[in-house]
Amino acid sequence: MDQGTLVVKLKGVMNQKMAYYGLHNENYGVALSRNRMYVNMTNLNTGDLETTFKVGEDSLLVSANGRICVCGDETQKPFPLLVWDLTSRKLVYDLRIPHHEFVTRLSAISDDGHYVVSVCRELHDVSPNFIIVYDLQSGTLFKKWKPESSSCSIAISSQGGCVLNGLENTWVLVWDLSTGARRFTLRGHSAPVDQIRMEESGKRCLTYDSRNYDRSVRVWDITKG
């Protein structure tokens, strides 16, 4: 970037409409393949494709520390969540709930790779969807919340010990990750929030509606509400 020169061209073709990718470390990147059936791990020094995970997914999350990758698999019904250890390059968990499916586009992973949160819905049920959190150290269900309205955005922070979700009724909820209690209900948006950006410390977040029905951008102190 300092010299403005091309360092390496990575082999393999991404899916341009679903440009899901992440960094494992300074030497490796992972990206969704063009046919959406694989996640490719590429050597950033040589550009060579070294490892392929067969998943058939419609999402890809990589923890900020580069250790954990979480994918959805839309080729299976109902959709599961697949958890990969990028260091050992192995599938560690295949997470499923009978008669439910994960809304994998509404999922997030904590920076340390300890937790994954996802919106989930019961099949053949029109009631509002709900939120589940898995502990990726053990692969067990950690928390489950069912708000009064369906969720349209989600975020999580281990540092802040919280989960945030935007509801279709325009509220943003803040949940305590350890106790499971609802900390705050943030009101003020005039349209559902579909984007939540967490500060690294987990003390603040930024929310907005990317469709511009609500043209405000709001920054919240989520320790005080």
Image: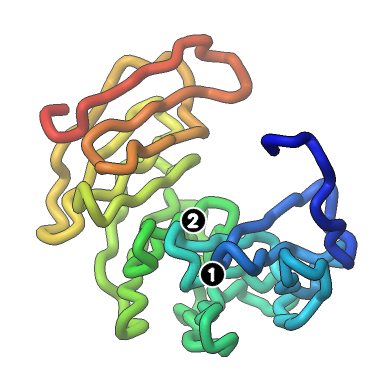
Q: From what the image shows, is residue 16 above or below residue 179?
A: above
Q: From what the image shows, is residue 215 above or below residue 136?
A: above
Q: From what the image shows, is residue 115 above or below residue 157?
A: below
Q: From what the image shows, is residue 149 above or below residue 61?
A: above
Which secondary structure lies at badge 1?
Answer: strand
Q: How many marks?
A: 2
Picture quarter with the N terminus: top right
Comparing 13 with 220, the one in front is 13
Nearer the observer: mark 2 or 1; the answer is 1
Residue 83 appears in the rendering: yes
Q: Position of residue 2 (x, y in %)?
A: 68, 35
Q: Residue at left 58%, top 62%?
A: 26
Comparing 32 with 46, the one in front is 46
Picture quarter with the C terminus: top left
Residue 124 appears in the rendering: no
Q: Position of residue 4 (x, y in %)?
A: 78, 35
Task: Pick out the residue farthest to the front.
Answer: 3
Q: Is residue 1 left or right of residue 108?
A: right
Residue tagged by mark 2? 107
Q: Residues within 10 Å of mark 2 (few under 14, many from 20)?
A: many
Comparing 113 with 73, the one in front is 113
Mark drawn on residue 30: none
Q: Position of residue 178 (x, y in %)?
A: 14, 61
Q: Earlier in the sequence, mark 2 or mark 1?
A: 1
Give the CA distance from mark 2 to mark 1.
Answer: 9 Å
| Quarter-of-image position of residue 183 | top left
Residue tagged by mark 1? 70
